[in-house]
Amino acid sequence: MVTRLALVLVLAAASPLAAADDLPPITVERLPTSLSGEWLFRVGHDPAWASPFRERRSWQRIRVPGAWEKQGYQGYSGHAWYRVALFIPSQLAGEEFGLDLGQIGDVDEVFLNGRPVGSTGSFPPRFDKASMAHRHYRLPRSVLRVGEFNELAIHVYNDSRFGGLLGPSPSVDTHQNVLRHAFLRDLFAYCLATLLVTLAALHVVLFLAQRSRTEHVFFAGFMVACGAYFLSYAYWGPALVLGHSGAFRLSIVALLGAVALFPPAFYRVAGRSQPIVIVAMQAVLALGAAFAVAWRDEGDLYVWVHLAEAAALAISVLVLRTLVHLVRRGHPWSVALLVTSGLFVVAVAWDILVDVGLLQRSHVVVGEMAAPIGLVPFALVFSLALSYTWVEHRWGEPLDLATGLIPRDRFVERLSMELERARRTRSALAVALLRVGGRVEDTGVDQIAARAVQLMRQSLRQIDVLARYDRDTFALLLADTEERTAMTILERLRRAVAEGDPTRHEKVPTTAGVAQFRATRHVVAEELLEEAEAALYAALAEGGDCTATAP
């Protein structure tokens, strides 16, 4: 009997209810002062709980920061209150205090000594989910009691997943320092987004110059998606325009898009097809992005966040294996890509562990995410690798010495890739053969050809491909161009070549034949070239110095 009574007394002394009455206040001896530790906590809602120094018998202790689901309230979603007593010594009377609470799931309103000092998000029935917003508030001097005890009360509402003060550790500092830290976080997010969008714009330009290099499009899309994701966490960012719920949806769409667009560029650089498992993941992620835009209940969207995080880890393993394959092949950028990609994957994995609650949220540089630290070197190195490949493909391939153009065999390869793109996108495509000069000596052919190339390049677009087809004939690939437009371009080129050489007294005759790609007729590039060649001979049979089309 005595043993049982002793056990009951020990359990009562150790229970949160018994310990709530003797919870010591936090003394703000210097600035900044961390408010991490044990606070009073109570589920439910009563506006009277904002009143300072209320009874503590129904309150329990909870660790801050940390989700309440991890501290005995698994599965609870709804209202809850936090309270903590602060002692502000008189030597800090001249300071303007600010409060940094980190991230809170999902909505909060803050009271100091029973007076409201700020809120973020909106409580039901007009719920505005603000779980991504970083909270910082000013503590008015008119409310703060210097040299006395103060009580801070926080009303929190959580709709789904994790609720409460999620981290990093809340702190009290001067209001100027709190604002400066918030400004630096946002400045870093905007600088990062600017860098990523600039890289994206560069690679869009490179793609427009070489339509066959689709890895530039995927990389540009990945950069834009990452930039939008990091900006969605900015305090002075999309939430000001879209609302907190809109910024939350933007974050999920950007996350899903970034994960889906991450692997294609790697596999195209490696010259390998994406595994079917990655293609399946991309289809699921695309479906999730559509749900994130249209689905009404935001709490249900977390399932797509979990899927995106799992897909990111799985895809990262496959991508790193591909990079190891590139290292073994001796790719010039493979080692740098492997190192920076590995750093980026580790940073992403760290953020995922924080997001699922396995690691505590903390300050990283000027923000709370490690991914930007790994993303910057990865983005720069991968951008350089893609640009190097682009330059090598455009100017590093075998060239005709007299004109500086790619030879016939390389033109056929480029035409084959462009033909596949036109078949896939159902876009227009035209091929032309242009013969320059009449009966001239062999020694003069290269001089005429070099001058003709100089004149033609001035009239062509970046996406057009010009090659030396044979001794006095040039091949021209006109992407996104129909036959009628191709005829106009050829007439302009013929006129430029015929009249553009002031050193020759006679007019240089030019003859052209053009053929338009038709998916039902042309299977391989050689068939399209044969039609263009037939059109060229038809024009020559008519006396030359004109343009003919394929029948």
Image: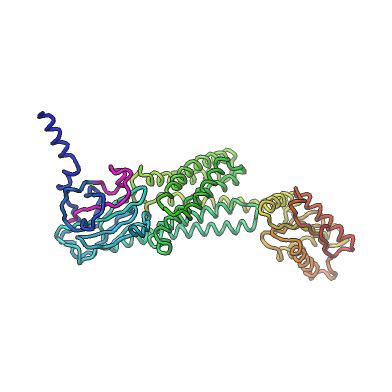
Q: From this viewpoint, is residue 127 visible? A: yes
Q: Is residue 504 left or right of residue 265?
A: right
Q: Position of residue 541 (x, y in %)?
A: 90, 60
Question: Residue shown at 77%/69% (left/top)?
Answer: 500
Q: Residue furthest front?
A: 125
Q: Quadrant for residue 436, please give it.
A: bottom right
Q: How is the image coloured?
A: rainbow
Asked if residue 351 is positioned above or below residue 171 in the image, the reply reads: above
Stretch of the chain drawn in magenta: 62-87
Q: Nearer the viewer, residue 469 or 541?
A: 541
Q: Position of residue 78 (x, y in %)?
A: 31, 51
Q: Position of residue 423 (x, y in %)?
A: 69, 51
Q: Is residue 31 left or right of residue 148?
A: right
Question: Residue shown at 56%/44% (left/top)?
Answer: 279
Indicate the quadrant containing the C terminus: top left, top right, bottom left or bottom right: bottom right
Question: Residue shown at 66%/54% (left/top)?
Answer: 425
Question: Residue shown at 24%/48% (left/top)?
Answer: 37
Asked if residue 136 is positioned above or below residue 312 in the image, the reply reads: below
Q: Is 72 within the magenta? A: yes
Q: From this viewpoint, is residue 451 visible? A: no
Indicate the quadrant containing the N terminus: top left, top right, bottom left or bottom right: top left
Asked if residue 538 is positioned above or below residue 350 in the image, the reply reads: below
Q: Is 164 within the magenta? A: no
Q: Position of residue 160 (x, y in %)?
A: 36, 49
Q: Quadrant for residue 97, please give it.
A: bottom left
Q: Nearer the viewer, residue 29 or 508?
A: 29
